[in-house]
Image: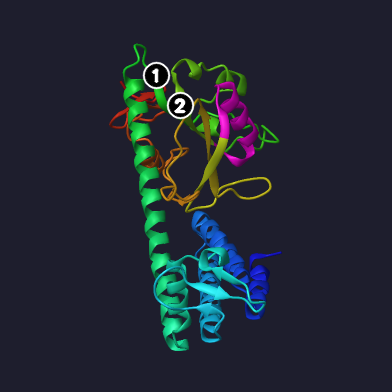
Amino acid sequence: MTALAHFDAARAALAEACRIDQARRIRDSAKAFEAYAREAKDGELMARALELSLLAERRAGELLITMAESGERDAGAGGDRKSRSRDGTVKTLAELGVSKKESAAWQQVARLGEQEFGAKLAATIGEARRALIATHAERQAAKKEARARREAELGAAQRALPDRRYGVVYADPEWRFEPWSRESGMDRAPDNHYPTSDLSTILARDVASIAAPDCALFLWATAPMLREGLATLVAWGFEYKSHCVWVKDRIGTGYWWRAKHELLLLGVRGDVPAPAMGLQLPSAIEAPVAEHSAKPDVFAELIEIYFPSLPKIELNRRGPARKGWDAWGNEAGS
């Protein structure tokens, strides 16, 4: 039975309830749903549960008032208040499963007019929603703080290693793309712009020796070279986790589609802290194309946002190393 069907059935049963224990069971069931909804951060389910709980308490209060007015319950002051059932037996509130505090509160709710009851219900739900939002925000803040602390501690530990190791490796390998025809398809090949390497050379690169035990690898790959990119990621000692897409401002070449994007693969080794919930960046990022094969600076900047403390190196860097990074490559400068 769905939650909605459960509430509908419970409200129908509540309208027929003629005993205190029947109203209490419905109220207790609603309280259980309320607790679940709070844990699941489901505001709508919580509101339905609160409404059913308050309705059940009002029904129980109505039954208590009716019993007092009909002489079935001793409503006098002092001692245990008692009720006399239709068969003549007398029971205390405790035997009915109702505390004095519950009896007073439920009768108070039962004496409210419809407008007053509606206002009380709205206030109760509103207060619960505000508490739920506050609790969720506190949990999110705690998670963000814990993740930032973990990243900072990891960075400090990696920088203290006796041998230089990196918590972030950012690589743009010099892929050699083989066209269908070398006679007619080499006019726009990467080899015309910079030296390239075959896959075996790239796979054999000992990146694992410079990677810290807990390390993230960001690896560029074009769509036709995706298989080679994933193979490189594994050969270097990383496990694929996800990727983001660079959406370019101009269209390129291609056999099946004219390429307008490249892929930045993400692999990890060890225990690398993912971003805290709410701090994840979008998986598709638009940025203009510059010189051939050059990657927009925004991606390195996004990596810095994720890992401000970890030591970082950029492989196949063009020009001097970025501030706070190390660099490697035949165009990396001194």
Image quadrant where residue 130 sits: bottom left
Q: Is residue 222 left or right of residue 112?
A: right
Mark 2 residue crowding within 10 angstroms, few (<14) / some (14–19) / many (20+): many
Judge by depth and name the residue closer to the eye, 281 or 207: 281
Judge by depth and name the residue closer to the eye, 327 or 290: 327
Q: Residue 293, percent across and down?
A: 47, 37
Whether 238 is among the magenta residues is: yes
Q: Is residue 280 left or right of residue 15?
A: left
**Residue drawn where x is 47% and y is 53% of the image:** 249
**Residue drawn where x is 36% and y is 45% of the image:** 142
Q: Residue 21, percent across and down?
A: 61, 68
Q: Which mark is residue 211?
A: none
**Residue drawn where x is 42% and y is 60% of the image:** 132
In the image, the segment drawn in magenta is 221-240
Q: Is residue 129 above or below residue 256?
A: below
Judge by depth and name the residue closer to the eye, 128 or 166: 128
Q: Judging from the image, what secondary structure is the residue with disc 1 in?
A: loop
Q: Residue 309, percent across and down?
A: 32, 31
Q: Which mark is residue 165?
A: 1
Judge by depth and name the residue closer to the eye, 112 or 313: 112
Q: Earlier in the sequence, mark 1 or mark 2?
A: 1
Q: Are marks 1 and 2 in contact (CB under 8 Å)?
A: yes
The residue wearing badge 2 is 215
Look at label 1 and name its amino acid. Arg
Image quadrant holding the C terminus, namely top left
Image quadrant where residue 91 sits: bottom right
- Marker count (numbered): 2
Q: Judging from the image, what secondary structure is the residue with disc 2 in?
A: strand
Look at label 2 and name its amino acid. Cys
Q: CA distance from mark 1 to mark 2?
A: 9 Å
